[in-house]
Image (spheres, helix red, strand yellow):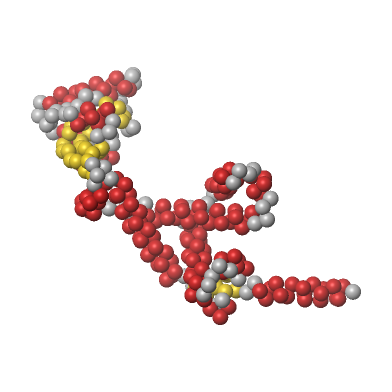
Amino acid sequence: MKRVLALLFILSIGPVFSENIIIAVVNNTVITNNSIESLLLGSNSKDHKVDIVNQRINVILQVEKAKELLIEASLNDVNLALVEIAKSNNISLEELQAYPEFLSLKEEVSEKISILNLQRYITEDVTITGNNANNICSKEATSTIKQIKIAQIIISKVEDPNDQDTAIKGFLKKLSKHISKGASFEGFAKLHSQHSSYSNGGITDWIEVDNPTVVMLDLLKDNEVSKIYLTDFGFAIGIKLDERFVSSNLKQCTEKLIYLKAEKFYANWVNGLREQAFIKIYHDAL
């Protein structure tokens, strides 16, 4: 009887295994028909099916790389995302967990977070120069905003056992007096500033004139040293170096250009992952 039952069991699961065939191999990972069946059902041609398989291959390669770089989705990140998904669907987390495909959903969320972390990591240094942004975005100008460039000396700590704020302000006042009498602001910034900008004389990037502190700096005359002001890094004094007017859409346009550049850079990088990987697609199985 046991042999008969075993035979019946084998016969009953045989068709299941035959349907869940391997359609691709990526390094040490296999892609089966069942794993992407829902996606393949919507395909209307073999080329479309191949595209779906290639998309899945890219996902696997990116998740593998995220794990290698130790930036894959954490359990906490996944759980927070699942809570947000439950809220957006007006159900409780428990109700979402009772969903028949919950484990697949959880895996998909984990993959997407891992890939997002990887994208940020790979494209974090992608930039576009100000001149390029101005040239490309000038046609989108609707109005102008004012920006200024300044140099700052920022002090966050001095060797004084008493009141740090008072001691720092006193030190900056001394520097200000020397600069007003002809001392080099750039030289003092390189010597005394405790901000990373010290190396280039305290010179900043272009700053939009959009808050009281920047307005105060904008009103400075040539070579005039500002009053002491507070920054995120400590107390500071500054001088105004230059000013310009740019399109009000420049920031949004620049961000769009950076996004497009990063998108292209990342796509090429993923193609590089494919070139280094072992990939085999069984076209006859599609």
Picture residue at 22% right of the left edge, 34% below the top: 152
Q: Residue furthest front?
A: 142
Picture residue at 48% right of the left edge, 61% below the top: 62
Q: Quadrant of the N terminus?
A: bottom right
Residue 99 or 128: which is nearer the viewer?
99
Q: Residue furthest right?
A: 1
> Where residue 30 sits in the image (x, y, percent)?
57, 70
Q: Quadrant of residue 103?
A: bottom right
Any part of residue 166 in sight:
yes
Q: Does 236 appear above or below 200? A: above
> Where residue 269 sits in the image (x, y, percent)?
39, 63
Any part of residue 235 in sight:
no
Q: Is residue 271 left or right of residue 22?
A: left
Total tally of numbered discs in the picture: 0
Picture residue at 17% right of the left edge, 34% below the top: 240
Q: Residue furthest left?
A: 182
> Where residue 53 sits in the image (x, y, percent)?
52, 70
Q: Residue furthest bottom?
A: 284
Q: Quadrant of residue 101?
A: bottom right
> Where residue 209 sits in the image (x, y, percent)?
24, 34
Q: Quadrant of the C terminus?
A: bottom right
Picture residue at 18% right of the left edge, 29% below the top: 219
Q: Is residue 174 left or right of residue 74?
A: left
Residue 252 or 190: which is nearer the viewer?
252
Residue 62 or 134: which is nearer the viewer?
134
